[in-house]
Image (tube, helix red, strand yellow):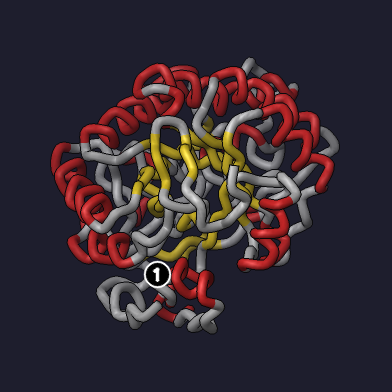
Amino acid sequence: MSNSLFSPYRLGRTELANRIVMGPMTRNRSIGNLAAEIEATYYAQRAEAGLILTGGVSPSPNGLGYARIPGLFTPAQVAAFRRVADAVHQAGSRIFVQLMHTGRIGHPANLPAGARLLGPSAIAAPGSMHTDTEGSQPHPTPAAMTEADIEEALAELERAAELGIEAGFDGVELHGANGYLIEQFLNTASNQRSDRWGGSVEGRARFALEAAARVAKKIGADRVGIRLSPYGVFNGMQPDPATDALYEHLAARLGELGLAHLHMVDHSSMGAPPVNPALKRTVRERFRGTYIASGGYDRARAEQDLAEGRADLFAFGRPFIANPRLVSKLQRGTPLAAPDMATFYTPGEKGFIDYPLEG
């Protein structure tokens, strides 16, 4: 097998042109929770990546916690995303939709009528949430999910995965990182349940494993991945003494499901505690499938980690924002442009599809 970052790779049933992944980034351009036409342009511009992971897409009205993020639970949303998938395929890449239920991270001002802010326990996230109508607001306390709520959320993930395939996506990534609903069950900062969905390592891992198993059964395990961020502190997450044991258990059980990939995020480049290298090695060994590494990579570090067998694929996030032809730039050693942080989450084309397309 070639050890080049630019060599082809087979991910599950999907053939990738190279080992570079465009990481998922929420960009808040989806007016009315529908993927906009400019999103098809945005992803197609970046289709040099072997694999594109979309920004977070909610499987449920309850998961639309941020302003202007897309959903995947209505026919109109499927049609909008079909435009995105078609554009990426025509440009030569492959694309997985990332399913992200925001859980307790949200505000009623961002949710559609009838939706509810839910979490494993009735514990508010620290900090505040932007709303387009009321400005910045403190995170409200979510309603603690009942057994019926949990079953509904799992069924919504199944259905959204099915709709993702209907829309033309090559697969699905479950967002089990960054403090959203799946990680809220994993983490004791947000999960203080005493029933079968909390407490022990096995209890806290149950929701993630059940979601992965159901989605895999629905669309095929070789079209399903999951993103994890042990030791991440985003959205109020906190490591605890059982963190390593939890993720070792999770990796082994996810590996038994035969998922297409496990996407490990190390947020230390953004100020979070680093993930213990020993934990990364154990997770990789226990999962056994394709391992995507993410977190502050450049070409040199990715090539070193590939040569040393630490990962199979490498996700680049923010560098793709201002460098649509990032793969060409990495290959040629061309200096990278810096993104405009002021337009990361604003509506419209500016700072989204207007970066120069040179490689």
In the figure, is residue 284 to the left or right of 331?
right
| Camera sees residue 143 | no
Secondary structure beneath label 1? loop
Q: Residue furthest front?
A: 1
Lateral position of residue 248 relative to residue 73, left or right = right
Q: Residue at x 34, y 31 (%)?
A: 161
Q: Is residue 285 visible?
A: yes
Side of 308 relative to 36 (left or right): right
Q: Which image quarter: residue 99?
A: top left
* Residue 130 picture location, percent across and down: 43, 65
Please tell me which residue is depicted at 64% across the width and 26% down the height of the picture: 205
Task: Residue at 22% x, 33% y: name it.
Answer: 166
Q: Crowding at label 1, few (<14), some or many (≥20) Cα neighbours within 10 Å?
A: some
Residue 209: horizontal and vertical position, in percent?
56, 23
In this picture, is 104 found above or below 130? above
The amino acid type of the residue labelled 1 equals Tyr
Q: Quadrant of residue 126?
A: bottom right
Instruction: Please give the residue where the numbered disc 1 appears in the rendered image.
Output: 345
What quarter of the picture does the C terminus occupy? bottom left
Q: Position of residue 27 (x, y in %)?
A: 38, 64
Of residue 108 and residue 88, the one placed in the foreground of this image is: 88
